[in-house]
Amino acid sequence: MLLGEVARRFHVVGDSKVAIAADLGISRFKVARLLEEAAERGVVRVSVVVPGGTDPERSVALAAALGLERAVVVEVPTGDDVVVREHLGQAVAALLEELLVDGEVLGLTWSRTLAHAAQALERLPPCTVVQLAGALHDAGSGTVELVRRVAAVSRGRALPVYAPLVTADAETATALRRDPGIRAALRRVDDLTTAVVAVGGWGEGLSTIWPAVAPHEREAGRRDGAVAEISGRLLDADGRRVPSAFDDRVMALELSQLEDVGEVVAVAYGAERTAAVLAAVRTSWMTTLVADAELADALLQLPPEELPGGDHGAGAEELPDGEGSGDGEGSGEGGDEAR
């Protein structure tokens, strides 16, 4: 009876050995011996649960290969995009709960994966949450709710952007940027301490902004070498910005603003976004990648000379148990299967 009570108080209730000893009228050394005995006799069984099915070894290898501070590789039991996004969202939530500290300014783009992350969050320290890009279809859908949800969990301030990601014309975008609320949100981009962005490819089904722009604008981006899209901004294979015909209609941060952000988490999934992720890595501002195993394997199978990190055995930061070492997604809404 005493053995079980000591084990319960220590492992389940969380009481200290000193408190248990005082309550039960025994020495703390006796408590320590009873805890050892409980483990030896199988009264206490220890199991390590890795959140979201993350693969720590592959995470460390991927971070080293890409030259990132950390990566989180998520094992997903099915290739169904909805399930993949849900698992990646859970991994992003766990990472944010681990990384964020009181007083941070957190920036978020929109993607279906990040919407899952917002729902999976259980706790965050107080922080300001900034919307980094508008929404597709209508100004109030998706992104605003995501930002508000994360701010509510942290009991911090939300700075939403009530605007579409891509406006009908440049004049509308200019007028919207004068709105006090939108101006306040976009100004805080320069104060970001952590940002989470979704990485999409530049092609049908790979970017949620693809259906929102005209066919000739899509093809112009391709001709100019675009392989990746983040918050409506295009990148070529070397991570350089590709100016687009719709740049002046996009309500979002400029990717160069991420260069001074201490922690930038990129989320992507699917082997078809390999080139997009490599482009994002080559920008130099990405610190962490959260990816599914399919995308991770596609990256790790590339010749070392094609990988920014080059050395698969060094350079990664190993995180605590249950987390990777540092979805294929772009931002905005619409194109449900894209991200």
Image: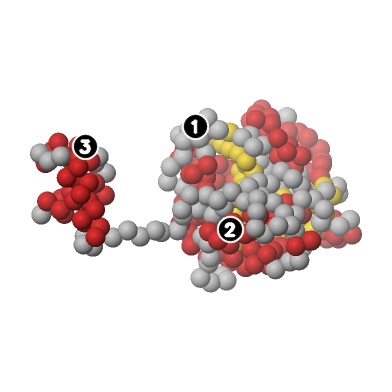
- Disc 3 marks a residue whose amino acid type is Val
Q: Please tell me which residue lies in front, 125 or 213.
A: 125
> Spatial distance from mark 3 to mark 2, Cα to Cα?
39 Å
Q: Quadrant of the N terminus?
A: bottom left
Is residue 322 found left or right of 24 in the rendered image? right
Rendered residue at 64%/37% (across/down): 262
Q: Which residue is drawn at 25% across and 40% down?
A: 16
State the residue position of label 2. 59
Q: How far is the residue under mark 1 from the one under mark 2?
A: 27 Å
- Amino acid type, residue under disc 1 in the picture: Asp
Quarter of the image with the C terminus is bottom right
Label 1 SS: loop
Marker disc for residue 102: 1
Give the number of the mark in front: 3 or 2.
Answer: 3
In the rendered structure, the answer to whether residue 127 lies left or right of residue 171 reads left
Task: Say which element carries label 3.
Answer: helix
* Residue 96 versus residue 40 in the image, above or below: above
* Count of number-bearing discs: 3
Q: Point out the tag, 1 or 3, that comes first from the N-terminus.
A: 3
Is residue 157 in sight in this rendering? no
Would you place residue 206 above or below residue 321 in this image? below
247 relative to 50 in the view: left or right: right
Q: In this view, does 320 lie above or below 218?
A: above
Q: Mark 3 points at which residue?
A: 18
Say whether residue 218 is visible. yes
In the picture provided, is 6 more to the left or to the right than 263? left
